Amino acid sequence: MDGVREFLDAVRHHQLVEGHFRGLLHLVIGRTISRRDGIVLSRGVTWRQLAEVLKLLRWDRDLVREFGLNPDDLPPRDRQRFWYSAIAGARIDMNEARAEADKLVPLVAKLGYVVSQASA
């Protein structure tokens, strides 16, 4: 999980989240993420694992507006349930999420990360 945290911290620090949030969720859940030196950070995570990391890193709840969700309509008190519900609402299995993720890949490559292609 430390690799996922490292990756998400870097993406947030370099302000690549806004406008790419659905694609970012798709990358973290469904693809292998490595450093340029070949060290694998993640081979994909479950929704629950990602929800826990987003909770721990205290990500901005308003990001869910990017895919049409209202943060006030999601579980307010339990942050892990909030993020799990948000991931479900993001529909990361759709072609739009894959396309958004593909647009994000070259941006994270500039940060030194290599992301595998989406499986068909």
Image (spheres, rainbow, N blue to C red):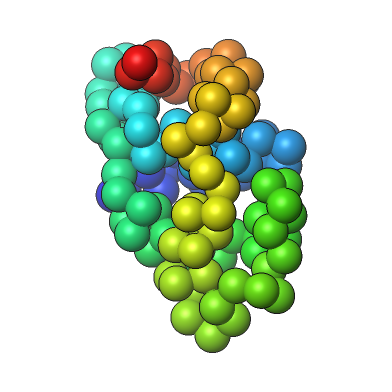
Question: Which quadrant would the C terminus be assigned to in this image?
Answer: top left
Q: Residue at x 35, y 27 (%)?
A: 31
37 in relation to 42, above or below:
above
Quadrant of res 43: top left
**Whole-percent x, y for residue 13 in the image:** 63, 42
The answer to whether residue 15 shows anywhere in this view is no
Task: Using residue 43 as the reference point, say whether residue 7 is left or right of it.
Answer: right
**Whole-percent x, y for residue 14 in the image:** 66, 36
Closer to the camera, 41 or 50? 50
Q: Residue at x 62, y 42 (%)?
A: 21
Numbered marks: total = 0
Closer to the camera, 36 or 98? 98
Closer to the camera, 106 or 13? 106
| The furthest residue to the bottom | 77
Q: Residue at x 73, y 37 (%)?
A: 19
Closer to the camera, 52 or 22? 22
The answer to whether residue 23 shows anywhere in this view is yes
Q: Residue at x 55, y 65 (%)?
A: 58
77 in relation to 114, above or below:
below
**Whole-percent x, y for residue 32 in the image:** 32, 26
**Whole-percent x, y for residue 22 in the image:** 59, 40
Quadrant of res 52: bottom left
